[in-house]
Image (cartoon, rainbow, N blue to C red):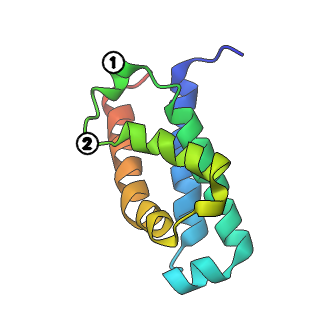
Amino acid sequence: MSRDWRLFFDDMILCAEKITMFLGDSNRETFFGNVILYDAVLRNLEILGEAAKQIPDDVKSRMPELAWREIAGMRDWLAHAYFTISPDVVWNAIEVEVPLLLRTLQAFKDENPS
């Protein structure tokens, strides 16, 4: 299936927004204690990582502050090595990396309207 990279870019923004919305003011204990919240966030991390794989290298190079390889790698880890998921890595991703990702993607989109 062929799809313009900008649609994948928008998917990344949407997933980051959903993760932020789902978390709300949840703390670590609440997050890991709520199986529905946990599964919803992990699913959006997977989609986000898959969409990141579809962004052209020349576009990625314009946002060097993002760890593109790690974003895609997290998707693979969640999908294929789900039995080794580290709570610390997941929590860091959603508390630190997703907000940075969302700010960076939104700023890029604002500066480069389609």
Residue closer to the observer: 13 or 27: 27
Residue closer to the observer: 114 or 74: 74
The residue labelled by disc 1 is 58
Residue 66 as seen in the image, left or right of residue 114: left
Find residue 74 and report its horizontal and vertical position in percent: 51, 48
Q: CA distance from mark 1 to mark 2?
A: 14 Å
Task: Note whether residue 27 is visible.
Answer: no
Callout 2 secondary element: loop
Instruction: Name the residue type under label 2.
Output: Glu
The residue labelled by disc 2 is 65
Is residue 66 placed above or below 39 in the rendered structure?
Answer: above
Q: Looking at the image, which residue is at 54% across and 73% down? A: 24
Mark 1 vs mark 2: which is more N-terminal?
Answer: 1
Task: Note whether residue 85 is visible.
Answer: yes
Q: Looking at the image, which residue is at 65% across and 83% down? A: 33
Q: Quadrant of residue 96?
A: bottom left
Residue closer to the observer: 32 or 111: 32
Callout 1 secondary element: helix
Residue 26 as seen in the image, left or right of residue 106: right
Is residue 97 placed above or below 27 in the rendered structure?
Answer: above
Q: Looking at the image, which residue is at 38% across and 56% down? A: 97
Residue 41 as seen in the image, left or right of residue 101: right
Question: Badge 2 local density, few (<14 within 10 Å), some, or many (20+)?
Answer: few
